[in-house]
Amino acid sequence: MQEGGSDSTVDAVVDVIAETAPEIRQGLVGRRGTVDEENPSGDEQVEADVWADGLLEDRLSSIDGVGQYASEERPDIVDCGEGVAVAVDPLDGSSNLKSNNAMGTIFGVYDAELPARGEDLVAAGYVLYGPVTTMLVARDGAVHEYELSGDERGVIERDVTVPDDAVVYGFGGRVPDWPDDFAAYVDEVEDELKLRYGGAMIADVNQVVTYGGIFAYPALESAPNGKLRLQFEGIPIGYVVETAGGASSDGSQSLLSVEPTELHQRVPVHVGSEEYIDRLESALE
Ligand code: P6P
């Protein structure tokens, strides 16, 4: 275990998220409407965003050894004592609530004050609210997948690894908004892989982790830093995919090496099988 973030604190964070996720799933009913607010990134908030964030803040900030709580849904960091920093995206892809499609919860445990780098992560993972609620946790060099149901947490597969043979791809943004070099890369990839894009990063990334391939929300002409947030999405998901034997990139370097400058900064996100990340970086050179 890394110095600072103790095993027991990381265990407690993972346990709290695993226990809260089925409650979040249950609580989505009746909370699908939008509230008249935006999150710090300017995204429209739905009731479930705010509610899930409140649940997670209340429970995670009271864990002994958690010193900071931060969320994509709130502008400022919650200081709660000494210890690791927990950054969450409480409901990633909540816009999918309207169409009743998959969503997720993302978390990263940093042994440093936020905003922090990928090298400061001691654990990260995500919950996927699919037909079954599953959770992937990356820590100590391995990724484990769990099925969550109420107070049960069964391990499905130890050492989840991204297959070398790629099958699927999913890219955010729109063709006219992709820079020419990325569009040229897409032309290659779409002839080789099957399109899997559902509008919630966790569901799309889980396809890549399961079948092999690449997910990207790239830099856009209209948004040179892309859409996804470094602290709450890019770094935690980059850590999961790299721990599972895949690769991540902001277009030129691992997402874990991107220098954070502010809590809600955006970053172009590309994660998946190493071959496709290497080819992407060559295409964007
Ligand atoms: P678009 C969800 O709002 C999210 O942050 C990610 O989960 C997802 O990958 C992306 O935005 C989807 O964006 O532009 O396709 O709706």
Image (cartoon, rainbow, N blue to C red):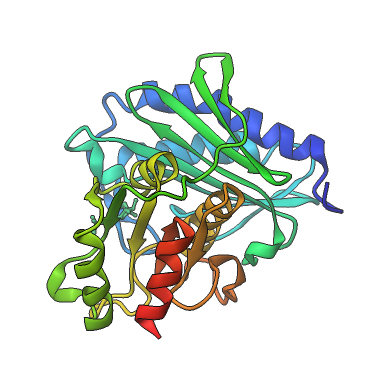
Compare residues 140 and 60 and report the one nearer the observer: 140
Residue, x 57% and y 51% (percent of image)?
245
Q: How many marks?
A: 0
The location of residue 4, given as percent across then percent down, is 84, 52
> Could you tell me if residue 63 is visible in this image?
yes
The location of residue 284, given as percent across then percent down, is 36, 81
The residue at the far left in this view is 176
> Could you tell me if residue 75 is visible in this image?
no
Image quarter for ligand 1 equals bottom left
Compare residues 68 and 266 and report the one nearer the observer: 266
Q: Is residue 166 left or right of residue 140?
A: left
Compare residues 135 and 54 and report the one nearer the observer: 135
The location of residue 119, given as percent across then percent down, is 69, 64
Name the quarter where the C terminus is drawn: bottom left
The location of residue 62, given as percent across then percent down, is 70, 37
Residue, x 40% and y 47% (percent of image)?
212
The residue at the far bottom in this view is 285
Residue, x 50% and y 22% (percent of image)?
147
Note whether 77 is above or below 130 in the view shown: below
Q: Is residue 68 left or right of residue 283?
A: right
Q: Is residue 191 left or right of residue 140?
A: left
